[in-house]
Image (cartoon, grey):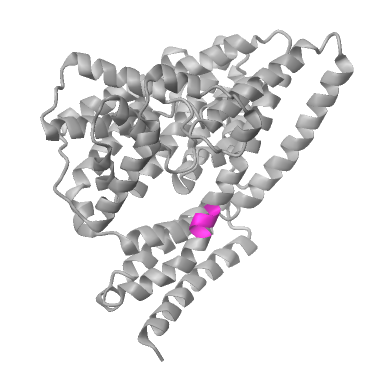
Amino acid sequence: MDINVFIIGIVLVLFGGILFVLNRMAAKYIKFPHRVFAGLGLGVLFGLLLQLPFFLDHKDAVKVSFDWINIIGSGYMTLLRMIIMPLVIVSISGAILGMDHNEDVGKTTGQILLVLIGTTAISAIIGITVSLFFNLQVPDIITDATINRGATLENLAATTNMSLPKQILDMLPSNPFLDMTGVRDTSTIAVVIFTAFFALAARQIAKKKETSFNRIKELNDAFHDVIMRMLTIILRLTPYAVAAMIGKMIATSSWGDIYKLILFIVASYVGLITIFLVHLLLLSFNGLNPLQYVKKSWPVFLFGFSSRSSAGTIPLNIKAQTEALGVSESSANLSATLGATIGQNGCAGLYPAMVAVMILATSGGDMGIAVMVKLVLAIAISSFGVAGVGGGATFAALIVLGIMNLPVALVGLLISIEPLIDMGRTALNISGSMTAGVLSSRWQKTLNTDRYNDASIVISSDD
């Protein structure tokens, strides 16, 4: 028997064992978060096992094995991308159509966007500060992966490097049905804009044509129920997908490269924690107990951390806001949905700022106040439309580096540590959207403070 075929068989059998264990845990009704972290732990052990000399001597066979294993990990992410557009449409429509007559749609949306974009700008400032404090430099790591990734990013940047006015115009939906296919980089935000227009128009005919309005609302509610069930089915695959993705990341990573970039990882998490503390301060300044927020939101953060998907966490995000934090349905729906595409504090705020400063410091570029202000403004404006399913941070960084006329190929240097940071970034993105929902509901005086302060009311991600 060919030794490579033998190695492939061993790797696939080992991973099959992980899938079997996770399936048995589900059959015994073990809580979903426990299964997700079991998948994470088993994936780590699996990846470390494949770093043993025996498997390293047969890298090609291991690589072929992951072509098959990757069906689960990449397939899961593809399914999440599939559901983003329908989820955005039914969530935005549901939030606007379901608003009480005494709620101001424009005011609520404006407040949510203010918090999302404002905290993203703050995140950029923190990213700049952290990068300067740690004196981050681009390490001299040149690998095939870096070169290939850099070439790809250079080509992609050619299509995203445009002026800010052109970027704003590009967000408008000239053909909403084409945008629903995700054909453009700004398709998601274009669909958000079209859906908001549609729902607002429907509300305006509610009094004169009540029958038509009720039909539209009932149809949207029906689609909402079906889309949420579809998403639930997809999310049940999370433990298996986490095991596949983390296993591949650890098994195929160059630990020498990761070691050289360890300072960037540490600095990133220092920045992420600092921004999270800013969220808690904002809640505290508005008379809300930040500890209650952390306790009741923790299951949502853990799910986002393990799945690395802001969009996939939307239902749990809304559930935590409405059931545990006392946020109004409209604020919860709008903040969770908008927060998955706009103003992501981790992916669109902190990360591009750190990358830009790291490149400027290495190349000896101008790092004056004017340049830093331009960087913060570029990050705030370009944070619109960063889809919340993995890879959004890279896209955001491309746009920002293009605006700043910095070499985008250097983003390829971070390829080996991307998943390690993305987990924390995703959790922070979700916290930003939840903070926006809570604050908006607080300002609109629709927040149920008794529910918010009731320590016995918590949610479970098992649903």
User: Residue at position x 15%, y 38% from top?
Assistant: 137
Identity of the residue furthest to the left in this view = 364
Front one among 272 and 405: 405
Side of 145 where 76 appears, left or right: right
Number of numbered tags placed on the structure image: 0
Q: Please give the range of residues in magenta.
A: 72-76
Looking at the image, residue 428 lies above or below residue 62: above
Q: Is residue 457 visible?
A: no
Magenta-colored stretch includes residue 139: no
The quadrant in which the N terminus is found is bottom left
Side of 36 where 8 appears, left or right: left
User: Residue at position x 54%, y 12% from top?
Assistant: 110
Q: Is residue 54 visible?
A: yes
Looking at the image, residue 212 lies above or below residue 148: above
Looking at the image, residue 181 lies above or below residue 195: below
Side of 273 where 284 appears, left or right: right
Magenta-colored stretch includes residue 73: yes
Q: Position of residue 436 (x, y in %)?
A: 50, 21
Identity of the residue furthest to the bottom in this view = 1
Q: Position of residue 420 (x, y in %)?
A: 34, 48
Q: Quadrant of residue 41?
A: bottom left
Q: Position of residue 211 (x, y in %)?
A: 89, 19
Q: What main secondary structure does the magenta stretch of the protein show?
A: helix
Identity of the residue furthest to the right in this view = 211
Q: Position of residue 171 (x, y in %)?
A: 51, 24
User: Residue at position x 82%, y 28% from top?
Assistant: 218
